[in-house]
Image: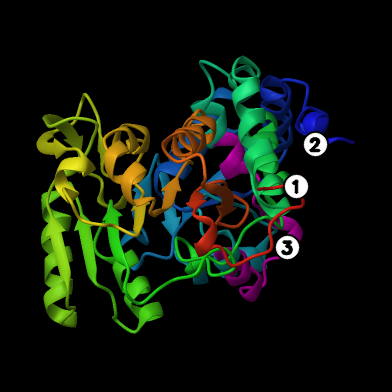
Amino acid sequence: MTGKNEFEEKLLNKDLYKTNAASYGEKISHKDNIILWGSGSASDALYQFFIEFHCLRGLKNYADNKKELWGMQKNGYTILSPLEVAEKAKEEPVYIIIASMRFPEIRKQLISLGIQDSMIDTAGFTVAIDYYTYKDETAYQIVKSHFNEFRQVYNSLADKRSKEVYLNILNSKISLDNKYLEFISSPSEEQYFDQELLKLKTDEIFCDCGSYNGDTMEAFFQLTGEKCRKYIAIEADKEIYLELNQKVADRSYKNVTAHNIACWNKKTVLKFQSAKSAGHIADEGEIEVLADTLDHILKDEPVTMIKMDIEGAEPAALAGARTVISKYKPVLCICIYHNLKDYYKIPLMMKELNPDYYLFVRNYTDMVAVETVCYAVPKDRINLKLEEGVE
């Protein structure tokens, strides 16, 4: 099998969207005593899926680890505590669908409560979320419409692991089946600072786009012993920006500069939907935020690393960073999971801005394709051995 046709041969060549959604719906329609574990947006998608595929007959309860939700009602069903789930399971078999991204922890918790692994469903989350994400245009249709671009990215990836992660995520999207995501995740604590891939320095000028409340900043300082030339944190949400500043003060972090602004491809004012860690630019947004380009925000700062997790605004932000990326060639750690088309758009943009970049892809959540990062790394910052033939 040559590298040229490897992608085409390994990619699923059939649109399984309707077939696999209906198959999962049929399976669940015959289950009794179903408990949806989680009460957030994932469980909302599953509930809508249950309605559409006539699966409500078996739904009995929700469950959640949040104490303040215990005993409350959601869609007419009581939210149980973990101990109540365990007691219920002693009386009669229960079928638990995990409606959360925290698969490993919750699965381990359920087993410790006496739930048999065969009665724990980790597939429903992916089926429901991707079913509604790709209802207007299936993942298969998107990949086929941009096949050459996806293949170009695949062939540009610098190591075998990246190709495996990239291809399996696409196959998971096409099939609505997260079995393809098994064994492809990397430890979550390595996100953005994956030292298998890149050499982290203690004199970085690090630009954190979508800094949230400083979680990435904490991880960075823990790895570097709080050493850097400068840490530039950029957060659009005003309330979270204030939390970020408070954390900097509480930890007495040095060399941190924070900006309450959104990264974009021009200086403007944008509508913004505040949603804690998932705040994003949206036409229906409730508040207005200032936006600007990284080229203007950073000016002549010789940045060495740029991280972006900005809920789908990454392509626009990269377009607004053309000068700084072309001039300083920083390591780029860019999230690509917010939109399937970003899986080709973002890597190709990075190679366009600096053809000498080496591209890597890693996924940092187990059994679900979120927190997927594309790294663009200059050769002198790479730690691992490159694929044969990669230059």
Number of the front mark, 3 or 2: 2
- Magenta segment: does it hold 325? no
Q: Amino acid at mark 3?
A: Asp
| Residue drawn at 46 percent across, 53 percent down | 38
Q: Amino acid at mark 2?
A: Gly
Category of crowding for the residue at label 2, using alpha-carbon neighbours closer than 10 angstroms: few (below 14), some (14–19), many (at least 20) = few
| Residue drawn at 39 percent across, 47 percent down | 40
Q: For the residue labelled by badge 1, is the local secondary structure a helix, a strand or a loop?
A: loop
Residue at the disc numbered 2: 3
Over which residues does the magenta segment extend?
106-128
Q: CA distance from mark 3 to mark 2?
A: 39 Å
Q: For the residue labelled by badge 3, is the local secondary structure a helix, a strand or a loop?
A: helix
Circles 3 and 2: CB atoms closer than 8 Å: no
On the question of residue 369 being in view, the answer is yes
> Which is nearer the eye, 2 or 12?
2
| Residue drawn at 46 percent across, 33 percent down | 352
Counting from the top left corner in percent of width and height, residue 350 is at: 45, 39
Disc number at residue 117? 3
Residue at the disc numbered 1: 389
Circles 2 and 1: CB atoms closer than 8 Å: yes
Examine the rendered structure and indicate whether residue 99 appears above or below residue 114. Answer: above
